[in-house]
Amino acid sequence: MPLALLALAVGAFGIGTTEFVMMGLLPNVADDLHISIPTAGHLVSAYALGVVIGAPLLAAVTARLPRRRVLIGLMVLFVVGNALSAAASDYHLLLAARFLSGLPHGAFFGVGAVVATGLVAPERKARSVSLMFLGLTVANVVGVPVATLMGQQLGWRATFLAVSAIGLAAIAALALLVPADHGHGQSVGLRGELRALGSLPVWLALGTTVAGFGALFAAYSYVTPMLTDSAGFAEASVTLLLALFGVGATAGNLLGGRLADHALRGTLFGGLASLALVLLLFPLFMKAEWSAAVGVTLLGMAAFTTGSPLQLMVMEKAAAAPSLASSANQAAFNLANAGGAWIGGLALAAGFGVTSPALAGAALAVLGLGVAAIAYAEDLRRAPATSPARVITPTPEPTRERTHH
C-alpha cells in the first residue's frame, strides 16, 4: 500500500482522538471552568455540529483545488481549533473552539477517501479507505485513553496541545507523502456537485449510514451503565472495556475493507445483519463479565465492518462529485451519533431496562438493512436490461456491470 495512506491515517488518528477525548475530560473541564457537567456536555455537541456543517460546506468550496493542498489546509484548521481549545479562557471561547475543531473533520475524511482510492488499483479501493479509517479506530484503542490520562494528570489543556502536535505531524506527512499532482477536484461546479449529490441512490446510501451507525450509537452511548449495572463491572474497569471495543472496531474495519473489495454489497448486508444480531443478543452478553467483554468487542467489530463499504458506495453513487458525497457521508455518521443516542435514551426513559438501548439499536440495524435492500432494488431498476443479443456478445462492459455489487 502507498505510504500516502499512512499520512491520511495520522490525520485520522488526531481527529479521532480529539473527537472522543472530550467525553473523558468533561469533569476536569467542568471543574476548571466552573460549569456543570451537563453544560460541559455541550462541548461534545458543538464539535458534532461543526462536523455536520463543515463536511459538505468545506468539501464544496474546495472542490476545484488540488486535493493535497485541501487536506493540508484542513489539518491547519484542525491544529488552529485545538490550539484555541487549549488557550480558551472561558466556556464560551472553548465552545467556539470546539466547533471550529469539528469543521474540518468530515471534509478531511471525505477528501481523504477520494485520495486514498485514487492511489490504488480499483480492486483495492475499499482496503485503501479502511487503512485511512485505521487511524480513527486506533485512536479509540490508544489515543483517547492516553490523551484522557494526560488531561487528568497534566490538565485538560495539555491534551489539546498534544492533539495539535499530532495535527502538525499529519501536515508534515501529507506534504511529504501525498503526491503533489495527485487528484485535482471536480470541474463540474457547485451546481453540478449538488446535482450529483441529490440523486436517489446517493440519498439511499446516506440513509443506510444514518440507520446503520445510529444502531451502534443507540447502544454504545449507554454502554457504561450496561457494563456496571447489568454486567457488574466496577467503574474503573470501563476504560479497559472501551479499549476492547476499539480493538473490535479496528479488526472489523480491516476485515470490512478486505471483504468489500470482493463483494461490496454483500459485505454491507453481512455487516448490518451481524450488527443486528449482536445488538439483539446484547442483553444476554451483559449477564456476566466475561460475556460482556466479548459482546463489547463484537459490537465494535460488527459496526465497523460496514464503515468502508458505506463510504465507497456513497462515492460510487456520486461519481461526478465524490469529495462532496464522501464528506456528506461523514456528516451522516455524526447525525447517526446524535440520533442513535437520542433513540437509545428514549428506550431508557420509557423504563424498558438498562440494556434496552441495545434492542433499540437492533431495530435501527434492521431498518438499515431495509434501506440497503431498497437501494439494491433501485440499482437493479436503473441498470440496463440484458437482452438475448447481449448474452452472446463477447465484448464485456465492466463499467455497467460494476453497479451489480
Image (cartoon, grey):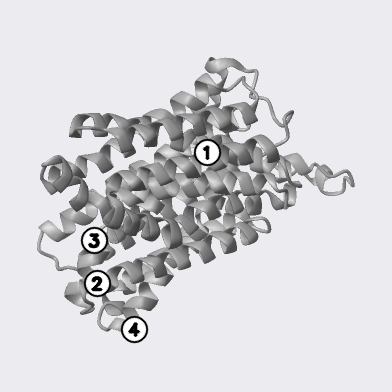
- Which numbered disc covers residue 168? 1
How much space separates mark 3 and mark 4, taking CA atoms?
Answer: 19 Å
Q: Mark 3 highlights which residue?
A: 222
Residue at position x 64%, y 24% from top?
185
Residue at position x 55%, y 26% from top?
196
Asked if labels 4 and 1 touch by Cβ distance under 8 angstroms, the answer is no
Q: Mark 4 highlights which residue?
A: 290
Looking at the rendered structure, the secondary structure element under dot 3 is loop
Q: Position of residue 339 (x, y in %)?
A: 28, 46
Residue 377 visible in the displayed image: no
Up the image or down, 310 lies above or below 318; here it is below
Q: Is residue 23 left or right of residue 257?
A: left
* Dot 2 crowding, Cα within 10 Å, few <14, some 14–19, many 20+: few
How much space separates mark 2 and mark 3, taking CA atoms?
Answer: 16 Å
Instruction: Compare marks 3 and 4 and give the one earlier in the sequence.
Output: 3
Residue type, mark 1 in image:
Leu
